[in-house]
Amino acid sequence: MKPIGYVVVALVAAAAGFGIYQFALQPRIQTGPIETRVISPPAEAEADAADDDDLPETLPDFTLANLEGQPQSIRSWTGKSMIVNFWATWCAPCRREIPLLKKIQAEHGAEGFQIVGVAVDFRDDVLKYAKEIGIDYPLLIGEEDGLEAVTKFGRGSLGFPFTVFTDNQHRLVLFHLGEIHPEQAEVMLATVRRVNAGELTPAAARAVAAKQLQELPAAKE
């Protein structure tokens, strides 16, 4: 990206009052170890499922470039229970959870779960990193347009990673801020299954998942 691109990104973030810029694209033009710039969500945010009344009812539509450079809508995966993971290459927790996301896709893709990574980062960096570690689920990539996609979830300032879970009708079921750990993933997948089966509404599912997530032992970093 040419220098003018940094100005555009900063202006977009400032205009939206969007704090995620501080932790996402901005670190690329600073110095120092990337780990010192990673946002650490408060403990109560790790199981951010109960206070989600401000979430959209359905997965917001946005279009970003895929790995082949073609524009693709996040709603392209019809009939799938979506797991949409927002991340960046410089984010240590994002990198740590990618093996788990790959495992979820491999083990649960056949039952209708679809992971899509949304990288809010510079395209060349994402392509290089995805090839290095073998990300095998779909990726959408954006810079300032990636930031605009994040704003559609109505959560104000956020850090990375964050993940949204939908049912197979693309209704938003769960929102998780922070790195996902295996025990949390099992709870969230089970909750989405119950929504798909008609046992719970998305709102009821959030309350159930919040209680179960809070009862889990604290994850070790």
Image (cartoon, grey):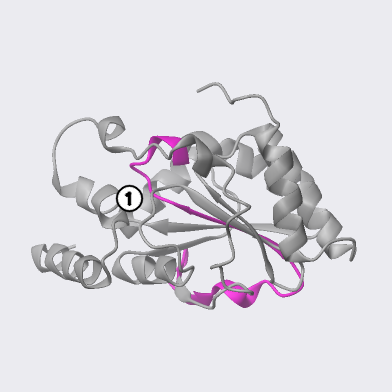
Amino acid type, callout 1: Asp
Residue sitting at x 27%, y 71%: 16
Side (left or right) of 187 relative to 45: right
Residue 216 x/y as whole percent: 69, 30
- Whether 18 is among the magenta residues is no
Q: Residue at x 70, y 32 (%)?
A: 215
Where does the image place residue 104, in percent across and percent down from the top left?
70, 44
Q: Magenta segment range?
A: 65-94
Residue lying at 46% horizontally and 41% vertically, measured from the top left = 94
Q: Quadrant of residue 11?
A: bottom left
Name the side, left or right, on which 155 lies relative to 100: left
Q: Is mark 1 on a helix, strand or loop?
A: helix
Q: Residue 53 at what x, y percent from top left? A: 59, 66
**Furthest residue to the top?**
220
Q: Mark 1 points at which residue?
A: 125
What x and y, as percent, mark residue 197?
A: 90, 62
When asked about the image quadrant of residue 201, the answer is bottom right
Quadrant in the picture for the N terminus: bottom left
Circle 1 Cα neighbour tier, 10 Å, few/some/many (<14 / 14–19 / ≥20): few
Residue 138 lies, with reference to residue 171, above or below; the image says above
